[in-house]
Image (tube, rainbow, N blue to C red):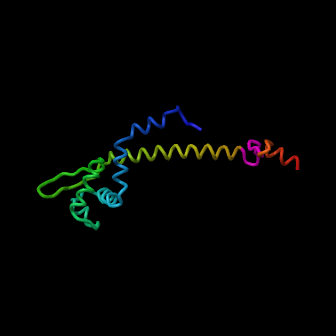
């Protein structure tokens, strides 16, 4: 069952990639998700982001670079301190993509619910047995 025009889903996906791919790839790591969580509360330095993580400052900086490349965060260096902040626009693109998928699934489930409500209590003659008889024909012969 296809909703809308054929190829519509592909076109929607092409509108999101590759930026969305980088966002989800960046969020795939639990340490980077923790950093994004921390930054959603406000800006933080790279060393503050690394405090709850069991990794070197160099490793934290590499994770920060992945998050920056994905567009999820921005950083600014003042003196020796690099301060990071969240970029809500990139988060919004992931949120929109997920919401679009949720909407499609909910529509399908709604249609299934409507179908089940319409056909509740009705015998199903659409399914045939191996002999070619419908299930109702088979029950009548017994």
Observer-nearest of 107 and 6: 6
Q: Give the left or right position of residue 23, taking residue 133 as reference.
A: left
Give the quarter of the image for residue 37.
bottom left
In which image quadrant can residue 58 be found? bottom left
Residue at x 23% of width, y 57% of height: 61
Place of residue 25 in the rendered image (x, y in percent of width and height, measured from the top left): 36, 51
Which contiguous range is marked in magenta? 119-128
Q: Nearer the viewer, residue 115 or 32?
A: 32
Q: Position of residue 11 (x, y in %)?
A: 44, 35
- The answer to whether 81 appears left or right of 25 in the picture is left
Confirm whether the magenta stretch covers residue 141. no
Work out which residue is located at the far front of the displayed protein and give it: 131
Q: Which of these two is toward me, 121 or 12?
A: 12
Residue at point 48% right, 37% down? 9
Question: Which residue is painted at 79% across and 46% down in the image?
Answer: 135
Furthest residue in direction right, as rendered: 142
Q: Position of residue 54 (x, y in %)?
A: 28, 68
The front one of 53 and 132 is 132
Q: Quadrant of the N terminus?
A: top right
Residue 87, percent across and down?
29, 48
Residue furthest left as drawn: 79
106 with respect to 86 (left or right): right
């Amino acid at each position: 069952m296809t909703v809308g025009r054929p190829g519509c889903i592909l076109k929607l996906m092409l509108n999101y990639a590759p930026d969305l791919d980088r966002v989800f790839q960046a969020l795939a790591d639990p340490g980077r998700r923790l950093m994004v969580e921390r930054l959603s509360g406000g800006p933080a330095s790279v060393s503050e982001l690394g405090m709850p993580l069991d990794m070197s400052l160099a490793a934290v900086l590499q994770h920060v670079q992945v998050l920056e490349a994905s567009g999820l965060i921005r950083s600014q260096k003042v003196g020796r301190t690099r301060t990071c902040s969240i970029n809500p626009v990139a988060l919004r693109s992931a949120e929109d993509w997920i919401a679009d998928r949720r909407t499609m699934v909910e529509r399908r489930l709604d249609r299934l619910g409507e179908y089940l409500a319409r056909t509740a209590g009705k015998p199903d003659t659409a399914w045939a047995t191996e002999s070619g008889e419908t299930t109702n024909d088979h029950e009548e012969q017994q």
